[in-house]
C-alpha cells in the first residue's frame, strides 16, 4: 500500500514539475485532445424574423452608413459562443448578419480576407459591386463576394433593401488569417458591364470559350438568380428526386469547376413540399439556415425548433437533425455551411439516424432566450 501511495505522490510532484515548465503528460489528456467524436461548444439557436427586422429598422433610423459605420448590420450572436468571448459567431466558423441599405445610400468599398455571400431577403434597386462589376439584387438571389475582392453596396431604388451576409469569420480568425483594407474612395471604379457575369454565364450551365483558360478558385458567376434556383428545384420535384435528409435540394456551384460556388462557404437551397418530413442524419459541417418561405420545424438532437418565414437558426456540427413542413405551402430553406473546407481537409463525415424509422423523439421545444444567462 505504501509503495502505491508513494507512486501516486511521485506522479503528483512530477505533474507539478511539468506544469512549471509549461509541459504536460499526453497519457492523462489524450482523450481531451483527440476525441472519439467531434467535440465543440456550439449550441443550436433560433432567431425570429419579426425581432430581427424590428431592430434592423430601428438601426436605419439611428445610424447613417459611411466610413464611421462601414455597414448597417445586425449580426446573429450565438449565446453559447458568447460565453467563450466569441463575439459575432453564429457557429465556430460561420457568421451571419442582416444588412439594411436605404435608397441613395452607399456602403463604402473595402476588401477582406474573409469570403462573403449575400442572400437577398427584401427589396430591389440596390447592387453589390465586386472588383468593378455591378450586380443588381432581387429577393431570393445569392450574390458572391470572394475573398480579397473590392466591394461596395449602392442603392438606386426607392424602397429599403435587406439581405443576409454570411462570412467565414470564425474560420479565418482561428487560422489567424484576417486582413482588412478600406478603398481610398467610397466607390470602386466600375470597369465591367452591369450584371456581366450573370449574362456571360447564363444559367450557370454554359461557359464562353474565351473563359476556358481562366484559372481561379472563385466562381466567375457573381449572382445566382432566384428564378434559376427555383427552376432547378421545380425540375427536381417534377422528377421526384428528393434527398431523404434534405428534401428537394440543390447546392450552388462554380460553373467553371463544378465545385462549390465559394471555395470556403457552401450554399444550399432546399424545397420541402407541404407535409414533408425528412429523415434525421448528422454531419461534421455546421450550418446557418434562413427560412425563405413557409413554416415548420427542425428537430435538433431531440429539441424542436419551430420556424416561419424570415427566421434564422443554427445547426452545430455532428447533431442529429430533420426538417418538417407543417404549412400548406412549400417551404424553402437557404443555408450556408463550412462543408467545402472540411471536405478539402478530409474531415467531413455523415451518419444516418437508424432508430424509430429515421426519426427522433421530441424531448423539448426551443424558446428564444433559453441559452441566455
Image: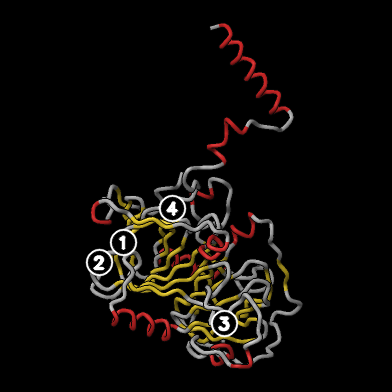
Quarter assignment of residue 233: bottom left
Residue at horizontal 65 percent and vertical 84 percent from the top:
214
Please give the residue where the numbered disc 2 appears in the rendered image. 326
Q: CA distance from mark 1 to mark 2?
A: 7 Å
Q: CA distance from mark 2 to mark 4?
A: 25 Å
Find the residue positioned furthest to the right: 184
Residue at horizontal 33 percent and vertical 69 percent from the top:
243
Q: CA distance from mark 4 to mark 3?
A: 31 Å
Please give the residue where the numbered disc 3 appears in the rendered image. 256
Side of 235 relative to 346 (left or right): left
Does dot 4 land on a helix, a strand or a loop? loop
Q: CA distance from mark 2 to mark 3?
A: 38 Å
Disc sitting over residue 297 in the figure = 1
- In the image, is residue 143 above or below residue 347? below
Quarter assignment of residue 121: bottom left
Side of 328 relative to 147 (left or right): left
Query: From the viewer's perspective, is the residue at label 2 or at label 4 nearer?
Result: 4
Mark 1 or mark 2: name the one nearer the start of the chain: 1
Query: From the viewer's perspective, is the residue at label 3 or at label 1 nearer?
Result: 3
Q: CA distance from mark 4 to mark 1?
A: 19 Å
x then y, percent, for residue 13? 66, 18
Mark 2 or mark 4: name the one nearer the start of the chain: 4
Does dot 3 land on a helix, a strand or a loop? loop
Does dot 2 land on a helix, a strand or a loop? loop
Mark 4 or mark 3: name the one nearer the start of the chain: 3
The residue closer to the viewer here, 260 or 54, is 260
Amino acid at each position: 500500500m505504501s509503495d502505491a501511495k508513494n507512486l501516486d505522490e511521485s506522479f503528483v510532484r512530477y505533474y507539478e514539475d511539468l506544469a512549471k515548465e509549461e509541459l504536460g503528460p499526453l497519457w492523462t489528456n489524450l482523450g481531451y485532445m483527440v476525441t472519439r467524436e467531434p467535440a465543440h461548444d456550439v449550441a443550436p439557436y433560433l432567431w425570429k424574423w419579426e425581432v430581427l427586422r424590428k431592430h434592423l429598422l430601428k438601426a436605419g433610423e439611428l445610424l447613417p452608413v459611411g466610413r464611421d459605420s462601414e455597414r448597417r448590420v445586425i449580426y446573429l450572436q450565438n449565446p453559447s459562443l458568447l460565453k467563450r468571448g466569441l463575439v459575432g459567431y453564429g457557429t465556430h466558423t460561420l457568421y451571419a448578419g442582416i444588412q439594411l441599405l436605404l435608397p441613395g445610400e452607399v456602403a463604402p468599398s473595402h476588401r477582406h480576407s474573409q469570403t462573403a455571400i449575400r442572400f437577398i431577403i427584401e427589396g430591389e434597386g440596390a447592387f453589390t459591386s465586386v472588383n468593378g462589376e455591378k450586380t443588381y439584387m432581387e429577393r431570393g438571389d445569392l450574390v458572391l463576394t470572394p475573398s480579397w475582392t473590392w466591394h461596395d453596396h449602392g442603392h438606386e431604388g426607392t424602397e429599403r433593401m435587406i439581405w443576409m451576409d454570411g462570412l467565414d469569420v470564425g474560420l479565418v480568425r482561428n487560422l489567424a488569417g484576417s486582413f482588412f483594407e478600406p478603398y481610398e474612395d467610397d466607390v470602386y471604379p466600375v470597369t465591367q458591364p452591369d450584371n456581366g457575369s450573370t449574362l456571360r454565364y447564363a444559367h450557370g450551365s454554359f461557359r464562353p470559350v474565351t473563359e476556358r483558360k481562366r484559372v481561379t478558385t472563385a466562381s466567375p458567376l457573381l449572382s445566382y438568380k432566384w428564378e434559376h434556383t427555383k427552376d432547378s428545384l421545380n425540375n427536381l420535384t417534377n422528377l421526384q428526386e428528393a434527398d431523404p435528409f434534405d428534401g428537394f435540394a440543390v447546392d450552388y456551384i462554380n460553373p467553371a469547376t463544378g465545385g462549390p460556388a465559394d471555395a470556403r462557404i457552401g450554399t444550399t437551397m432546399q424545397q420541402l413540399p407541404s407535409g414533408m418530413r425528412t429523415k434525421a442524419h448528422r454531419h461534421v459541417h455546421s450550418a446557418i439556415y434562413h427560412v425563405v418561405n413557409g413554416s415548420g420545424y427542425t428537430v435538433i438532437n431531440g429539441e424542436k425548433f419551430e420556424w416561419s418565414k424570415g427566421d434564422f437558426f443554427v445547426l452545430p456540427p455532428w447533431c442529429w437533425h430533420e426538417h418538417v413542413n407543417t404549412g400548406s405551402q412549400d417551404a424553402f430553406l437557404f443555408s450556408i455551411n463550412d462543408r467545402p473546407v472540411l471536405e478539402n481537409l478530409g474531415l467531413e463525415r455523415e451518419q444516418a439516424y437508424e432508430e424509430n424509422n429515421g426519426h427522433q423523439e421530441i424531448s423539448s421545444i426551443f424558446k428564444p432566450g433559453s441559452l441566455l444567462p
